[in-house]
Image: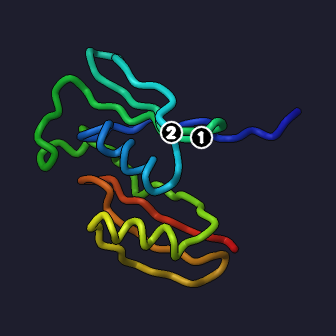
Amino acid sequence: MTEAYLEHTNITVENPDALASLLCTLFGWTVRWRGGAKNDGYTVHVGNNKDYLALYRPKVIKDIESNYETLANINHIGIVVPDLAEVEKRVLSLNFDTYSHGDYEPGRRFYFMAQRNIEIEVVSYL
């Protein structure tokens, strides 16, 4: 039997197109599909040929501050890159702040907020 792997994760976000565009710019990903989704919502699948993120927006987004279940209830999305410094330059050039830089086993990393409630951890194991 082949080893199991994670194909995709579906998360609720405010603006799927904007987040997909950012992820394509930073990580060289592509939009695999976009279109209508459950309950008259909208979804964008962004990633590579093997795995992706499904970025879902319901027809109506309730007030984010009063309803934590509306947007992604996750700690962060971890993305492995070959050149951490190059990706951080791209992130900074798009006026995002980076923080929580770490250089410890098993790799180096930093974080940034891609959208409200969507934190990205960028890590390199080289």
> Residue sitting at 46 percent across and 32 percent down?
45
Vertical placement of 107 versus 23: above or below? Answer: below
Residue 76 in picture, x, y percent from top left: 42, 57
Residue 108 in picture, x, y percent from top left: 57, 77
Q: How crowded is mark 1: few (under 14 residues within 10 Å), some or many (20 or more)?
A: some
- Residue bearing mark 1: 48
* Residue reaching furthest to the right: 1
> Residue sitting at 51 percent across and 30 percent down?
32
Residue 89 in picture, x, y percent from top left: 42, 73
Does residue 114 appear left or right of residue 63 in this picture? Answer: right
Residue 91 in picture, x, y percent from top left: 38, 66
Vertical placement of 93 versus 60: above or below? Answer: below
Quadrant of residue 43 within the rendered picture: top left
Q: Distance between the residues labelled 2 and 1?
A: 6 Å
> Residue sitting at 70 percent across and 74 percent down?
126
| Residue nearer the viewer, 115 or 86 | 86
Q: Mark 2 or mark 1, which has the lower sequence index?
A: 2
> Residue sitting at 62 percent across and 36 percent down?
7
Q: Residues within 10 Å of mark 2 (few under 14, many from 20)?
A: some
Does residue 15 appear left or right of residue 84 in this picture? Answer: left
Dot 2 falls on a residue whose secondary structure is strand
Vertical placement of 7 versus 112: above or below? Answer: above
The residue under label 1 is which amino acid type? Answer: Asn
Task: Please state, as top left, top right, bottom left or bottom right, where the N terminus lies in the image.
Answer: top right
- Residue bearing mark 2: 30
Q: Is there a contact, CB below 8 Å, between mark 2 and mark 1?
A: yes
Does residue 43 appear left or right of residue 77 in this picture? Answer: left
Dot 1 falls on a residue whose secondary structure is loop
- Residue 82's disc number: none
